[in-house]
Amino acid sequence: PMRTRITERGRSLSGGQRQRLALARSLITDPEALVLDEPTSAVDSHTEARVATGIAGLRRGRTTVAFASSPLLLDVADRVVLVHEGSVVAVGTHRDLLRTEPRYRAVVTRETDDEAAADPRQDIGAVPAMNSIQQIEERA
């Protein structure tokens, strides 16, 4: 595998392989701050779990912002921020937000509107909307 030739622009690679290669290239530079956009969207769940654990370990002590809806990736995050219609509406850990924020749960679990309406947990412990950085920091 290490001797395999890669065609121009990675055309001989699968989407998941291209995504992992791009992620590896960004991680090897070890920047102080790194922004990732759905870094595991093109890989299977087994690979996604390994990538999530790897990112968490390699980026410890550095700032990493990941735009993601993957439960595996969100579970290893120190802090998760839910943005709805351009405003921050909740901040917490993945597990806390699953328990307290119906909008978060719907996005992460890909729950339908009918399933959400039937869920008795929907209104329990809802986090009020927060619109400023100061409020986010106070909740964290």
Image (spheres, helix red, strand yellow):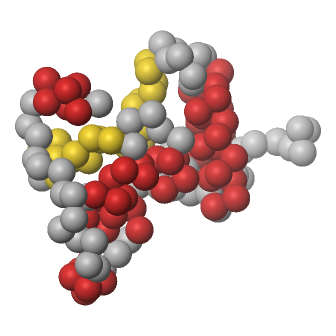
Above or below, 75 against 102 in this view is: above
Which sits in the foreground, 58 or 24? 58
Residue at the location (10% across, 47% down)? 129
- Residue 96 visible in image: yes
The residue under the point 69% across, 53% down is: 47
Res. 123 image quadrant: bottom left
> Looking at the image, which residue is at 23% across and 33% down?
139
Left or right position of 25 against 84: right
Q: In the visual, does 46 lie left or right of 62?
A: right
**Viewer-nearest residue: 97 or 131:** 97
Does 106 appear above or below 88? below
Q: Quadrant of the N terminus?
A: top right
**Image quarter in which the C terminus is found:** top left
Describe residue 130's horizontal placement relative to residue 50 as left or right.
Answer: left
At a point 28% along the width and 79% down the height, the residue shown is 119
Q: Where is residue 115 in the image (x, y as percent from the top left)?
A: 30, 83
How many marks can you see? 0
State which quadrant residue 135 falls in: top left
Horizontal and vertical percent position of residue 83: 21, 47
Please identify the quarter of the rendering in which residue 79 is found.
top left
Task: Answer above or below: position of 83 versus 110.
Answer: above
Front one among 32 and 101: 101
